[in-house]
Image: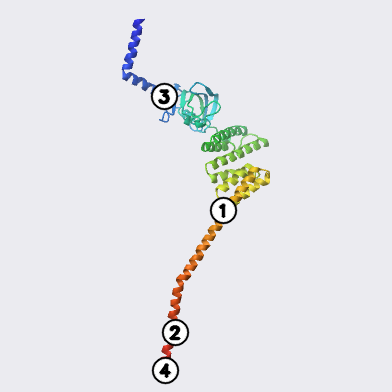
Amino acid sequence: DENKNETDTGHKEAKAQNPSTQESDSKEEKEEWMDILGSGQLKKKTLKPGTPDSRPQKADVCEINVTGKLEDGTIFEQFKCLEINLGDNETIQGLDFALALMDKGEEAEIIIASRFGYGSLGFKPLVPPDATLYYHVTLLDVKPEPLISTLEINERIAIGCRKKERGNWWYSRDEHTLAIHSYRRALDYLDDTDIPGEHTDEQMQHLLEERLKTYNNLGASQMKISAYDAALLSIDQVLNCQPKNVKALFRKSKILKEKGELSKSIEVIRQALAIEPDSKGFQQELSLLLAAQRKDNSKQRDLYKKMMGNSLQDNDSDKKKKAPYNAFKWIAAFSFAVAVIGAVAFKYRL
């Protein structure tokens, strides 16, 4: 036993004294992990290989088993046979990126820095701010995205609502570009054209209501990134079908205000007040708009007065400049007349 211990100790000392062995171990460890972004913030290690050349493409339906843990081992989410569309922001960005590099049937560990996870907000109550996430993922199956025209109305509503809710989640985290993408994808499914199979009026009404909610939320997200023309188009989609939708009217008034169209903005908020005359929010908004309009009108009057004042000053200046010239003309004309009269008088005297 003493000889064995001495031998083990000798091996350890030899390994410690051999830098090439340490470098080899370090290299093997690095090769196990794929540094997806090259920054160390997103890494993947394959535990079980999948079918070669079977990676999912954008919008493909990925079926996964997934478990997410914190550094201390706390499980914060766990799903079996979860289906998501790759690249549709239906999960955190780091997991979306890593799935694109997995083969069908592959089992992998994924380490995600907070930037590509739940960020500085965390995910209450389990994920604290700025937490590194550790995922165990199995890519069970990969299927192409179904043609929307082949989906019956209940399937369209279910998928569309799922994507709309994801948009709401991104909106709540101030990730407005991601929210906009989710809402647009939801609208692809909440389309009422070419729906196969039979459907009732109630189902069609449900689909329409979900579509209008999505347009309303899309407009709100577009406002957040100052895309006011696009936001106006989205909100008008709602008002074309629901002209008394006060939430849409309020947002349209806000958009017109930002575009500098105060008169139109006031007209729209008055429409909202006519529907809900007791709304303190609408009353306050109208007061602010009227005050802004008075201020704008006052500025225009001051500018007009200034322009008119400059015009009058220019006229006075022109008159002063012309006065000496006019006097010279009169003197010249008078001198010429005197000369003519003198010449005539001299002629007849002779």
Q: Which amino acid lies under the numbered mark 1 shown in the image of this protein?
A: Asp
Q: Which is closer to the viewer, label 3 or label 4?
A: 4
User: Could you tell me which quadrant the C terminus lies in?
Assistant: bottom left
Q: Quadrant of residue 4?
A: top left
Q: Position of residue 249 (x, y in %)?
A: 62, 45
Q: Which is nearer the eye, 343 or 94?
A: 343
Q: Look at the picture and state if 236 lies above or below 109.
A: below
Q: Marks 3/2: CA distance? A: 110 Å
The residue at which mark 3 appears reads as: 33
Element type at mark 1 = helix
Q: Tell me which numbered mark, 4 or 2, is placed earlier along the sequence.
A: 2
* Contact flag, marks 4 and 1 (Cβ < 8 Å): no
Other residues around mark 2 within 10 Å, as few (<14) / some (14–19) / many (≥20): few
How many labels, in total? 4
Q: Which mark is residue 337?
A: 2
Q: Which is closer to the viewer, label 3 or label 2?
A: 2
Element type at mark 3 = strand
The residue at which mark 4 appears reads as: 349
Q: Is residue 81 visible?
A: yes
